[in-house]
Image (tube, grey):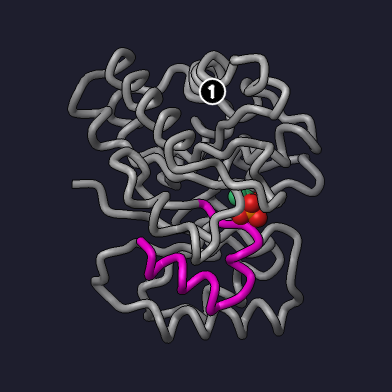
Amino acid sequence: MRKPFIAGNWKMNLDRAGAVALAKELAAAVPADGPVQVAICPPAVYLDAVREAIAGSAVELGAQNMYHEASGAFTGETSAAMLQDVGCQWVILGHSERRHVLGETDADINRKVHAALAAGLPPIVCVGETLDEREAGRTQEVVRSQCDGSLAGLTEEQMAKVVIAYEPVWAIGTGKVATPAQAEEVHNDLRKYFENRYNHALAEGVRIQYGGSVKPDNAKELLSQPNIDGALVGGAALKADSFLGIIAGA
Ligand code: PEP
């Protein structure tokens, strides 16, 4: 049984006071031992303040990115150990904005995935096709190739710790949500991919979140699909009532 996992990606939004206030509101509302696992991923500079705000609650803390090296002369970068030091339990890797705006490749993401797992920090690894790729009928090929590249070399034991987020690029921040059938088709194919690459037990255990304009009013239908195990939420994670509405939908 895969526990639904809803993660909020706050991206480069909010200020310190707003981040702390939102975190406190969520911490007070998310029940301990509830049926849904919940994480929030604030901007890196607010991780420490948000950790304090959610201390003792069921809300988990995640980062939006990291660098693959452990330490050294890498100006502006943050290591997995540093994220853990400020209380991170998750790190998002390979988000489409990092792939398409900041030029990250599958090879870059793969190095980060290995470094995160080596440090004991489980990653949420994002994959997803652009509109052109979908319209050219290349969704399956693109998503599988992103998995081949960004998850290269992972043992079964390592893969079991990874969460996948399927996020069609055309649905992120656009208000255009994939239909439950469109999303389920890709999730189902991803599960087959993991079955072929590893085995049935691994494939059945891997959690695959959907991301792309998830809102309280579409969450329930998306999350009731058999292979959709949660959501990675951008815009709707920036307000407590909409994020809590999505959690309720799960
Ligand atoms: C995201 O940032 O991962 C995302 C899915 O954003 P939005 O929910 O705003 O589409």
x and y percent of residue 113 in the render?
A: 52, 33
For image coordinates 35% across by 28% down, the residue present is: 188
**What residue is pinned by disc 1?**
143
For image coordinates 35% across by 61% down, the residue present is: 250
x and y percent of residue 124 in the render?
A: 48, 43
For image coordinates 72% across by 22% down, the residue present is: 132
Q: Nearer the viewer, residue 71 or 1?
A: 1
Q: Nearer the viewer, residue 32 or 137?
A: 137
The answer to whether residue 37 is above or below residue 71 is below
Disc 1, SS: helix
Relative placement, left or right, of 80 versus 102 is left
The answer to whether residue 203 is above or below residue 217 is above
Magenta residues, dominant SS class = helix
Residues drawn in magenta: 232-250
Q: Is residue 242 magenta-colored?
A: yes
Q: Is residue 163 magenta-colored?
A: no
For image coordinates 53% across by 23% down, the residue present is: 143
x and y percent of residue 46 in the render?
A: 67, 70
Q: Residue 158 occupies which quadrant of the picture? A: top left
User: Few, some or many C-alpha atoms within 10 Å of disc 1 (few <14, some 14-19, many ≥20)?
Assistant: many
The answer to whether residue 25 is above or below residue 42 is below
